[in-house]
Amino acid sequence: MAGFTLLEVLVALALLAIIATAVYGTYFTLFAGKETTIAGMEERRALRETLDSLRRELNGAWFRRNSQHLRFVVEDRDHFGKPASRLAFATMAPPAPPGMPVSDQVAVTYSVVAKGEQLTLARSSQGVQLDEEPLNYPQMENIEGFLVECSADGSKWVRSWDTGINGTMPKAVRVTLQLRENGRTVGYTTLATIRIAGS
């Protein structure tokens, strides 16, 4: 009765181990690639939603000349060389569901919060006409920078603005969110046109 020699069994086991390693390596590489792709898609979705929300809110921005709280303010700040603007303004909120006591005028602040090396874009909002607590939450995490620029005529852009000082709203606001992609910093920009005059 013919059988296998010990050498043949060892060679077969070695070949099986090599094939199994290659198959599992390929599987885990594909799985890691899928996870990376999903994370990238989620980051792009959050980026798109953040920039779209900022543009819509800025399109409805307004200010009141005699109010210390209802101003349009952009402060030029940085965090170890990375742009970290602070943006505060009042805007018209979307209609609330029936029965919800929500003001249609909201004071919004966007600022950068640092935890070690990690930067997060935080959003705070509070109804202008209602006595309510501000709602604070992280808008977007793991950013490389947040830059807000304003223009009075579309030709010159400045990084600071205060309606309490110059008494007018900018005509346009350019917001750039910077992210880290493939080892380099990439900026994504949205442009908002102010449509409501101050009072």
Image (tube, rainbow, N blue to C red):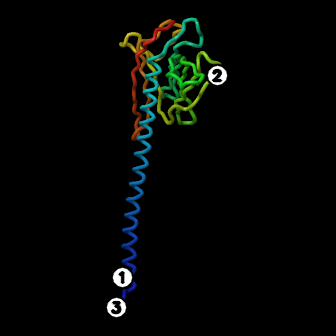
Write the residue at 55% across / 24% down.
98
Write the residue at 44% across / 40% down.
42
Label drawn at residue 8: 1
Name of the residue lying farthest toward the front: 98
> Where in the figure is residue 133, as x and y percent of width and height?
64, 24
Asked where in the image residue 196 lies, by quadrant, the reply is top left
Judged from the image, the secondary structure of the residue bearing numbered disc 3 is loop
Q: Nearest the camera: 182 or 138?
A: 138
Tag 3 or tag 2, which sits nearer the N-term?
Answer: 3
Which of pointers 2 and 3 indicates the residue nearer the eye?
Answer: 2
Write the residue at 44% across / 22% down.
56
* Image quarter of the N terminus: bottom left
Q: How many marks?
A: 3
**Residue type (three-letter) at the residue carrying disc 2:** Glu
Find disc 2 in the rendering and name its residue: 132
Badge 2: residue crowd in 10 Å (few <14, some 14–19, many ≥20): few
Judged from the image, the secondary structure of the residue bearing numbered disc 2 is loop
**Distance of mark 2 from mark 3, alpha carbons?**
87 Å
Badge 3: residue crowd in 10 Å (few <14, some 14–19, many ≥20): few
Residue 106, compared with residue 50, is above or below; it is: above
**Residue type (three-letter) at the residue carrying disc 1:** Glu
